Image (cartoon, rainbow, N blue to C red):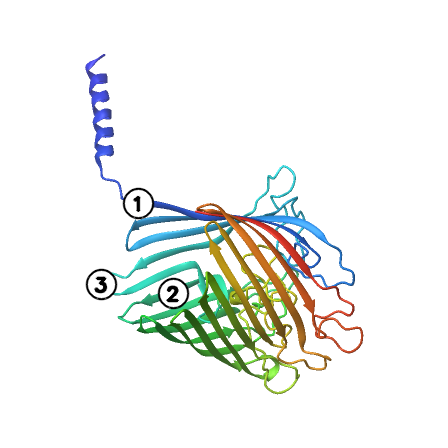
């Protein structure tokens, strides 16, 4: 080998050695997620997020799955990037977009599976502000209200700042939930608007104070501004109010064998057509250790409206259709949608907890037990609207359900669920006026489901 070639070879090896000697940034990679599959036999769920109350409703069988993959790029204890993605599919696929939009066109559950179904759930930066007790989260992130999700539990784009100051934990957040600055096809020139002019914005101020190890109290103020104009070419955000203020208080206490939670919230502001908004929500929840398991009990009240003039008194959810609202303490499947379900997530009144602006009064109770690898629960619930209007009855119905499951491995469970709803006179009656979501001669809904759930 010539001297020149030896010199070049030595230089290349030296450069490679120097490059590999440079200390790399210490980056921790974390992966988490879940895989859940449901198989349903039901005369109520349709597989697309709608509820069937037809006379002599036929039973149907279908299955669906959901996978969630979370990747966290952690630079150090003070800085990380969180990403979270979701893949949903119905067995056999759904190749046309449904009216509910629950499944995308080209669902990957179809034959040969080659479809695009990756959905963005979260992408946000999580960091601690140096020399302060403040934590910041910036980007598309999960958020829930302080009221069991009856106002909203969602993923959205925003900025959240929280801190820990002794026993006090304050949180300040801003979310932009809608921003429309496009013009419709064929509309006149200049009909579009600038970004931020047709927007839906939420500001949240929340505080919690730990009085002692057994008692925590909290209070919050939410402000939602729905900016819109008379421009018919603009698709407005999904909020039926123009300006909403919401104030509330909540508490959680451990009293002997009982864990108690309660909240109350009041909404006021500007509703549509010059009407004022004046609405209430309240709940009490108890979980009590009894014998080898727990007794669960909950009551929920959401105020309703039955007038076309004066104050609008129906408790407003963050989204008009209730699609981001939940009340998981009910442990229901048919009266109130269950938080475990996937794209079939719905109930007798749809996803809307306020049941067509009539409000809701619900009483729920049950017992849960776990012994070794076996777990089970049984529940009963009754619900009615808060305002029946001209309907002959306010009763929605009474549900009974039960689940039995087995822990196959530490991260894998299998379970079987059955639920049956006896419809009330407000929903099913041959004579008289029914509630807005009722149907004469409706068939009592039922549901059975087999579930596999893997988390990591």
Q: Which mark is residue 200?
A: none
Residue 216 visible in the shown view: yes
Q: What residue is shown at x 34% (from left), y 71% (from top)?
A: 214
Q: Are marks 2 and 1 in contact (CB under 8 Å)?
A: no
Label whose residue precedes the other's in the sequence (2 or 1): 1
Q: Position of residue 201 (x, y in %)?
A: 48, 70
**Cα–Cα gap, marks 2 and 3:** 18 Å
* Residue that badge 2 annotates: 160
- The N terminus appears in which quarter of the rendering? top left
Secondary structure at numbered mark 1: loop
Label 3 crowd (10 A; few <14 / some 14-19 / many >=20):
few
342 up-or-down from 16: above or below? below
Q: Mark 3 touching mark 1, by CB under 8 A?
A: no
The residue carrying mark 1 is 27
From this viewpoint, is residue 68 visible?
Answer: no
Point out residue 288 in the picture as x, y percentages from the top left corner.
45, 68
Q: From the viewer's perspective, is residue 267 above or below residue 48?
A: below
Dot 2 or dot 3, earlier in sequence: 3
Q: Residue furthest right?
A: 431
Q: Is residue 46 above or below residue 222?
A: above
Looking at the picture, how far across and down is residue 268, in whole percent? 51, 82
- Crowding near the residue tagged with mark 2, few <14, some 14–19, many ≥20 C-alpha atoms within 10 Å: many
Q: Secondary structure at mark 3?
A: loop
Q: What is the crowding at mark 1: few (fewer than 14 residues within 10 Å), some, or many (at least 20)?
A: few
Q: Residue 16 sits in which quadrant?
A: top left
Where is residue 25, by image quadrant? top left
Q: Residue at x 66, y 71 (%)?
A: 397
The percent coordinates of residue 437 (x first, y second) are: 70, 70
Residue marked by disc 3: 131
């Amino acid at each position: 080998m010539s001297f020149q070639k030896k010199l070049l070879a030595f230089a290349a090896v030296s450069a490679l050695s120097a490059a590999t000697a440079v200390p790399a940034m210490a980056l921790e990679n974390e992966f988490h997620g879940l895989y859940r599959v449901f198989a349903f036999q039901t005369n109520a769920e349709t597989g697309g997020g709608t509820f069937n109350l037809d006379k002599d409703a036929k039973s149907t069988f279908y299955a669906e799955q959901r996978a969630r993959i979370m990747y966290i790029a952690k630079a150090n204890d003070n800085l990380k990037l969180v990403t979270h993605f979701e893949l949903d599919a119905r067995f056999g696929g759904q190749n046309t977009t449904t009216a509910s939009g629950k499944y995308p066109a080209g669902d990957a559950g179809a034959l040969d599976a080659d479809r695009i179904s990756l959905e963005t759930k979260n992408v946000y930066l999580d960091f601690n502000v140096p020399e302060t007790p403040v934590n910041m989260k910036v980007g598309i992130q999960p958020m829930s209200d302080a009221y069991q999700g009856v106002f909203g539990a969602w993923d959205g784009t925003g900025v959240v700042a929280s801190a820990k100051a002794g026993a006090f934990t304050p949180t300040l957040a801003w979310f932009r939930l809608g921003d429309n600055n496009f013009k419709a096809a064929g509309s006149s020139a200049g009909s579009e608007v600038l970004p931020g002019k047709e927007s839906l914005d939420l500001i949240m101020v929340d505080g919690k104070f730990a009085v002692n190890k057994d008692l925590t109290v909290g209070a919050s103020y939410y402000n939602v501004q729905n900016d819109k104009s008379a421009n018919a070419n603009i698709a407005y955000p999904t909020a039926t109010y123009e300006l909403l203020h919401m104030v509330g208080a909540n508490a959680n206490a451990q009293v002997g064998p009982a864990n108690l939670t309660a909240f109350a919230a009041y909404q006021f502001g500007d509703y549509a057509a010059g009407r004022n908004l004046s609405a209430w929500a309240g709940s009490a929840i108890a979980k009590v250790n009894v014998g080898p398991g727990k007794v669960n009990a909950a009551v929920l009240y959401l105020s309703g409206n039955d007038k076309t003039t004066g104050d609008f008194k129906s408790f407003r959810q963050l989204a008009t259709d209730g699609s981001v609202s939940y009340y998981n303490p009910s442990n229901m499947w048919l009266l109130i949608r269950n938080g475990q379900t996937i794209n079939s997530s719905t109930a007798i009144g749809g996803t809307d907890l306020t049941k067509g602006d009539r409000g809701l009064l619900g009483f729920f109770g049950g017992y849960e037990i776990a012994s070794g690898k076996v777990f089970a629960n049984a529940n009963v619930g009754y619900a009615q609207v808060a305002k029946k209007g001209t309907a002959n009855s306010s009763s929605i119905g009474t549900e009974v359900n039960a689940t039995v499951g087995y822990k196959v491995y530490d991260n894998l469970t299998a379970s079987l669920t059955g639920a049956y709803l006896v419809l009330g006179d407000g929903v099913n009656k041959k004579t008289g006026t029914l509630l807005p979501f009722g149907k004469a001669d409706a068939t009592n809904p039922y549901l059975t489901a087999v579930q596999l759930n893997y988390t990591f």
